[in-house]
Amino acid sequence: MNNTSGIFPSLTDILGQPISREQALSLIPDDYTTQDRLKQLSPASYEKLLSFLQGNSGLLITYDNFFKKIFDPLLHPNRIQDFLSCILQKEIKTLQILPLEGIKLSDTGTFVMMDIVIETTDGEIIDVEMQKIGYHFPGQRSDCYASDFIMRQYNRIKAQKGKTFTYQDLKPIYIIILMEQSSSEFKNTFPAYIHREIRSYDSGADVRHLSKNIYISLDVFKSVVHNITNKLDAWLTFLSSDKPEDIINLVSAYPAFIDLYHDIAEFRKDPKELIYMYSEALSILDRNTAFYMIDEKQKEIEDLQALVAEQTTSLAEKENTLAEKENTLTEKENALAEKETTIAALQAEIARLKKNQP
């Protein structure tokens, strides 16, 4: 619900009473495990964590363990429903969050920060995934996930219904990908930041498919949307920014979000658990991001090597063509020389014959 009261909250109202840096540091347990995890954080991550503990900024909850706690459907069923309803542009009623094990293909070296699979009361399956870095080949990857979900659903429902099964019993599968850093496919469509798959046939035939992919570029969203004008803007701001000014603007526009931030602020009360959850999520992502960057650089090298090889081959072909032309020219010059020699001989013979005439 939009704010119509004209009363705007402060950051203290939202995140609680701020404390000094020294007070925040004193709250951190000095046991070896906690301190070791703290040391493993990058300087930027360390400062973000400390700023949150002080109450000076928010905390991004796009990491799996934070997200599932804030969106716990048993405690807060309306949150995930409202979020998904805004994205899918229809009312969603969630039945349960499904365990990932055994229901979804897994990635190795993943850059997935959060992954949650939801079953609705209508039997639809919604897979929501947050990626730190947008994957290469996003369409192919999402189609593999959707196909896997469809086949698992097919096998389950067919086993339940037996001979009464029809393909109409199968329910839609939605793959929703949120990206902190978009891949080139989506950056190239700037300033668009929501990409909803639309399938159609050139004949106009109305053929329905089970899967639908939706990609959301949070980096593009942050660069083009500066005013929160609707509920979807509010949700995407909530997921993409921990800046105090964005938090205040969001709660000022949609006061209901203050409850979510109050729940986030609860993490300030248990620094040890916060550090564990935060460092665990970041360590995996940082390691995989490093591997990703190495792979990217290796790919750049391979692309350059392929380009050099292509240019070398092209140059060799041109040199061969030039050599062939030079050979042809030499042959023509030799043929011309032979003709000139023949002409000279004929002219000499004519001269001789003329001289010998009586």
Image: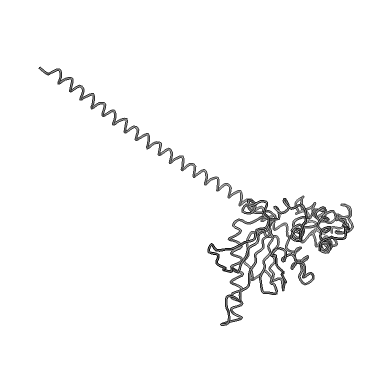
Question: Compared to 155, does 224 lie above or below?
Answer: above
Question: Compared to 219, does 67 lie above or below?
Answer: below
x then y, percent, for residue 287: 68, 55
Q: How many marks?
A: 0
x then y, percent, for residue 254: 81, 60
284 and 220: which one is in front? 220
Question: Compared to 153, does 298 lie above or below?
Answer: above
Question: Compared to 47, does 202 lie above or below?
Answer: below
Q: Can residue 208 be seen in the rendering of this structure?
A: yes
The single residue placed furthest to the left in the displayed view is 358
Residue 236 falls left or right of residue 110: right
Q: Which quarter of the figure is the N terminus placed in?
A: bottom right
x then y, percent, for residue 180: 70, 55
Residue 179 falls left or right of residue 140: right
Residue 40: quadrant of the picture: bottom right
The single residue placed furthest to the bottom in the displayed view is 163
